[in-house]
Image: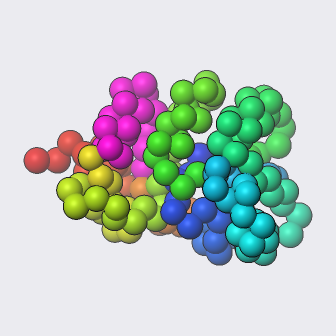
Amino acid sequence: MIKLLRVDDNLLHGSVAFSWVINLKIHTIIIGDDQVVNDQFMKMTLGLSKPSGVNLLILSVNDAIKKLKDEQDSNHNILAIVNSLSNATKICDNTSTIKHINIGLIRQKETEGKQHGYMYLGKKDIELCQKLMTRGIKIEYRLNFNDEMFDVARLIYEN
């Protein structure tokens, strides 16, 4: 079962590995990233960040989608992590069970956009969020599991 789809520029790091994995009782972490899948050093580094006893799969975005589809109804709790809202949208477009996206760190890449905490949404990100929200997918910003949840719709639709 896909417990959470997270968007984070840093992919897997300490607060994700321990805060989210422990609280959601995650068995498998799937990182979907077309660049990292071919970077042995990054794969090794990410592997060091995972808690013991938790499986880590680093796949291309398309392979991550296939794996998530296969695991939708499994008894294993899965945390899927991507580094962009475009990859998150691609996953949501190709799976049917994701109804909630968590955003952690997104660095500023454009000059125009909106920011809340460590999340910066450029124009394209805002459009993707709007598309996902119209499909009933809730998008929230929260770095750690125990942090207060911030509804991204508040940021996008504020004046």
Q: Is residue 28 left or right of residue 123?
A: right
**Relative height, residue 23 to residue 140 (above, below):** below
Above-or-below relation of 51 to 33: below
Tell whether 110 sits left or right of 103. Answer: left
Q: Is residue 135 left or right of residue 130?
A: right
Q: Percent position (x, y) of residue 147?
A: 47, 66
Residue at point 42% right, 56% down? 141
Q: Which residues are magenta?
A: 124-140
The spot of residue 50 in percent (x, y) is: 77, 68
Magenta stretch: dominant SS?
A: helix
Judging from the image, the colouring scheme is rainbow
Pinpoint residue 10: horizontal percent, then vertical percent: 56, 67
Q: Is residue 126 magenta?
A: yes
Residue depicted at x 65% and y 65%: 12
User: Which of 159 and 106 lies nearest the eye of the viewer?
Assistant: 106
Instruction: Identify the residue at the far right of this view.
Output: 53
**Residue drawn 27% across and 46% down?**
123
Question: Foreground residue, 61 or 115?
Answer: 61
